[in-house]
Image (cartoon, grey):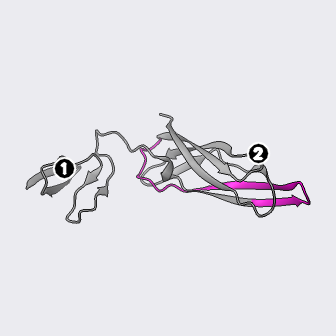
Amino acid sequence: MRAGWIATGSVALVLMACSSAPDAPGVTKTADPTPVRTVAPQGQPDYVPVPGDFPLTVVVTSTECFDTAGCNVTYELDVKYSGLPLATASTYKVIYTVAGATGGAITGNFTATGAGGDKVSIGNRGEYLTTTRNSGVKLTATARQVISGD
């Protein structure tokens, strides 16, 4: 069994592990065998978000359909962030695609900036216009890539 001390500010934690294998960065072993994700310790690289940290929902704000020509659809993206806290003022460009449009997938981007603690500011959003084959087509959006802007 190994025991170790980690000091952060004025708080000290005792960690005990029953394995001689080194711990993976960003993972703390607990009595429960499930790893726990933690914020990067001081001096370690900051957390870099991945596409899965940005669940996207297409919100249709208006639809105008025509007999045989399909529909004009105006939409916005509802962007959430579910990852670890980002360093304050760190900026990332998130590339996404919207599926379901008549002409194929639409590629777009927005920015995500760490705003302190678990807050993230999302920029470059607005209303978008596309066409669909008919009123039954549902638009869906998926984050595809995250590019560091620092």
Residue at horizontal 47 percent and vertical 56 percent from the top: 82
Picture coordinates of residue 10, whole percent (x, y): 21, 52
Q: Is residue 123 left or right of residue 148?
A: right
Furthest residue toward left:
1
Q: Secondary structure at mark 2?
A: loop
Residue situated in front as seen by the camera: 103 or 45: 103
Q: In front: mark 2 or mark 1? A: 2
Furthest residue toward top:
150
Picture coordinates of residue 92, whole percent (x, y): 51, 40
Residue at horizontal 90 percent and vertical 57 percent from the top: 68
The mark tally for this picture is 2
Judging by the rendered image, the residue that carries numbered circle 2 is: 103
Residue at horizontal 29 percent and vertical 43 percent from the top: 42
Residue situated in front as seen by the camera: 105 or 32: 105
Q: Is residue 116 left or right of residue 13?
A: right
In which image quadrant can residue 57 be found?
A: bottom right
Q: Is residue 93 left or right of residue 26?
A: right
In which image quadrant can residue 11 be found?
A: bottom left
Circle 2: is it few (<14), some (14-19), or many (20+) Cα within 10 Å?
few
